[in-house]
Image (cartoon, rainbow, N blue to C red):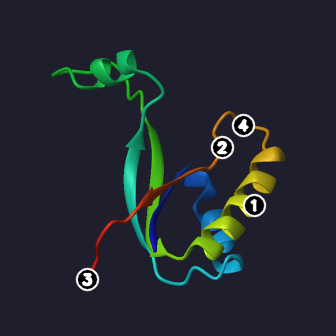
Amino acid sequence: MKLLIVTAVEQFEKEVLQLFKKANIESFSASDIDGYKNASSFLMNSSWFPSKKSSAESSMFFSFTENEKIDTLFILIEAFNKNLETNNPIKAAVVPIEKFI
């Protein structure tokens, strides 16, 4: 079992859910997050009176799941990202779990 973390801009939330379904990942959690491209935009946004919002509304999904499902999802995400016309690919990372209950 491993921890799968997937991030995507808000516009791709439905697509991520479809990819999870195709990979047979049925149990997961999701959260809305703000995404930043670089540290300077974060610093600008953290001031008392920011002049503009410099973050992108994004979603983060995570699931404790098996390697086989993760491998399938990575193949699906790679195929999806190849056809993008934006600079915001779906990103995924896997973290090993040493112990769990």
For marks 2 and 1, the one nearer the N-term is 1
Going from the N terminus, do you reach mark 1 or mark 3 first?
1
Label disc, if present, on residue 61 of the rendered structure: none
Mark 3 to mark 2: distance in Å? Answer: 33 Å
Tell me which residue sits at (15%, 22%) in the image.
Answer: 48
Where residue 44 appears, x then y in whole percent? 30, 18
Residue under the point 75% across and 63% down: 76
What's the amino acid at mark 2?
Pro
Front in this rendered view, residue 71 or 59? 71
> Of helix, strand and loop, which one carries label 4?
loop
| Quarter of the rendering occupied by the C terminus | bottom left
- Mark linked to residue 101: 3
Dot 2, crowdedness within 10 Å: few (<14), some or many (≥20)?
some
Question: Mark 2 or 1, which is nearer the eye?
Answer: 1
Cα–Cα span, label 4 and label 3: 40 Å
Amino acid at dot 4: Thr
Q: Which residue is mark 2?
A: 89
Residue 97: image location, x then y, percent: 37, 65
Circles 4 and 2: CB distance less than 8 Å?
Answer: yes
Q: Which residue is mark 4?
A: 86
84 over 66 or under it: above or below? above
Which tag is nearer the camera, tag 4 or tag 2?
A: 2
